[in-house]
Image: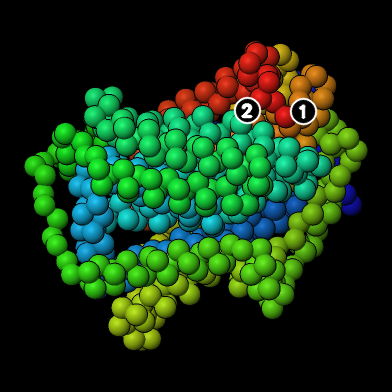
Amino acid sequence: MVWQQVYNPFGNMIVSTALAAIPVVVMLVCLGLLHVKAHYAAGLGLLSAVVIAVFAFGMPADMAGKAAFLGGLSGLLPIGWIVLNIIFLQQLTQQNGSFQILQDSIAGITEDRRLQLLLIAFAFGAFFEGAAGFGTPVAVTAAILIGLGFSPLAASGLSLIANTAPVAFGALGTPVITLAKVHGYDLMAVTAMIGRQLPFFSLLVPFWLIWAFAGRKGMMEVWPAILVTGVSFAVPQFLVSNYIGPELVDIIAAIVSMVCLVLFLRVWKPKKIWTSVSLKGHETDGGEAGPAVTPTKHASAAVIRAWTPWLILTVFVFIWGLPVVKAWLNGIFAPSFPIDGLHNMIEKVAPVVPKPTKEGAVYQLLLLSATGTGILVSAIVGGLIMKYNPIQLVAAYGRTLWLVKFSLLTIVLMLALGTLTRYSGLDTTLGLAFANTGMFYPFFGTLMGWLGVALTGSDTASNVLFGGMQKVAADQLGLSPNLMGAANSSGGVMGKMIDAQSIVVASTATRWFNHEGEILRYVFFHSIALACLVGLYVTLQAYVWPFTAMVVK
C-alpha cells in the first residue's frame, strides 16, 4: 500500500515544523552542548526521528525502519569507504616517515602557517572537491594539516571552512548536473547563475579562513597572498561555469589558484612568519606560537618519494571521477537492490511537486566506481612503492579499520537519520517553513539550501530535496527559477561545514575522536554567518539593480 507524505499533520505549521525539527535538535544538542559521543548523539537523533516519523507524521513503522537501513548502507558506501581508505593511506605515510619529509617540503615553500592553509586547505582541497567530493577534500586536507603540526581543532575546523566555495561544482559538477536533470532546469543556465554567485564568496572565503585562524591583524599581514589565491580561483570559476560547463569548474580553478600562489610566494614573503599551530583565541587547543623553525632540507629524490603517494592519490581520484571511467566500472559490477516495501511505496505530494510522485528506494552497490575504491587502489600502489609488502599492507589496513570503527558507526547512524527524514517528509516540512516567507523568500530560500546540506551532508542531496520546491516558489513569487535553483546550491555549500558526516570525517582524519561537539561549536557561527551573506547577496540579485542584471532568466 502506497503511503503519501504528510507535511502538516496537525493543521498548524508551527507545531508541525517544531516536531519535524526535534531529531536534528536532539542530535545537535547532544553533540554540541551535552558533549555526548558522536555515535550516541547520532543514535539518539535517529531514535527520535523514528518516533516522530511514525507517531506524529503517520509513516508506517516498517517503512521507517527500511528507510533508516537504506541510509545506513549509503553511509558505509560511499562516505565511510572514503574515510577508511584515506586514513589507511595517511597511516602508511606516517609509519615510514615520508609524511615528515612532505611536511618539510611544504614548509620549504612557506613556513608561514597562514600561507600553508591557503595552499592546502583552500586550493588543494578545492581540487579534491572538484575531482571527488563526498568528504574526500576534508579527509585529505585535515590529515595533511595535522601531519604538519596544526592543532586538532585548527586542522578540523579550518578544513571544513575552506571546503565551502567549491562544493556546488564538486565531483565533476554532480550537484548542478543532478539539479538540472531531476527538476528540469536548463543545465548551462543554472550553472552560469551559480557562477555569478559563488565567485564573490570564493574571493571572500580565503580571507575568512585566515581571519578565523589568525585574527584580523594576522590576516592583514598576508592580504596580498590571500587576494592572489581568491582572485585566481574566482575568475576561472566564473569563466568556466559561464562559458564551458559545470564539470571542470573546480579542477581548473584549483590548479590555477595553486600555481598562482606558489609563483607569487617566490617573489613575496610576509614580514612576520606565523608559526602558531592553534586558532587565534584557542591557544590551548594544541600548541602555542613559537619562533620560526627552519625546515630540514631533504634530497630531491627523498622529497619526490614522499610526495609520490599523494600524487598517485590525486591521479587515481581524478581518473575515478571521470564519467567514462565510472560508466565502464559500473558496467563491470554495479548490482542494484530495490528495498522491498519502500521502493515506490512513498509518494511526495503538493505543494512540493505538481502531482503525486513516487520515491524510489534502490541501493546500488557502486563498489568499483566509488571514490573510496580509487583511494584504496592508490594507497596500495603507494604502499608498494614505499616498500611495504602485502602482509604489512593487510596488517596496516586492519589497524586502520579498528582505529575508525566508531567513526564508521557514526556515519552509518547519521546517514540513516538523514535518509529517514527525507522519506518521512520531515525535512520537507522544514523546507516549507522557509518557503512561506513571501518577499523575503530569496534570503530564506537560500537558507533552505543551507538546511538541506546540513541535514543530508550533500549539496547533491539538497538539490534533489529542495530543487523542485525552489522552482515552484520562484514561479509563484515572480522570481527567476534559475536564481533560486542556484541559490539552493550556493547557500547549501555553507551548510557543508556543519553537516554531521563532514564533522566526523574531520575528527577521524585528525584522529581527534570524541571531540565532534567542539568542532561543531567552532564552525557553527562561520556556517550560519556565511549562509546569511549568501542569502543577502541572492536577495540583492532578486530585487536591486545592478545585481538584477546578473540574473539568468
* Viewer-nearest residue: 38 or 222: 222
In what element is the residue under mark 1? loop
302 to 350, vertically: above or below: below
* Viewer-nearest residue: 321 or 35: 321
Please state if 367 lies on the left or on the right of 275 as rendered: right
* Quadrant hosting residue 261: top left
Q: Residues within 10 Å of mark 2 (few under 14, many from 20)?
A: many
Quarter of the rendering occupied by the C terminus: top right
Q: Can you give x and y, in whole percent of width and height, for residue 472 in the image?
A: 81, 29
Q: What's the mark number on residue 446? A: 2
In what element is the residue under mark 2? helix
Q: Can you give x and y, in whole percent of width and height, for residue 131 in the image?
A: 54, 57
* Viewer-nearest residue: 365 or 311: 311
**What amino acid is at disc 1?**
Lys
* Residue at 45%, 51% in the rendered image: 255
* Residue at 39%, 49% in the rendered image: 258
**What amino acid is at disc 2?**
Thr
What residue is pinned by disc 1? Answer: 553
543 to 372, vertically: above or below: above
Judge depth for marks 1 and 2 and give the one in front. Answer: 1
Q: Can you give x and y, in whole percent of width and height, for residue 514 in the image?
A: 36, 49
User: Which residue is the extreme one toward the left?
Assistant: 291
Q: Is residue 287 visible?
A: yes
The image's colouring method is rainbow
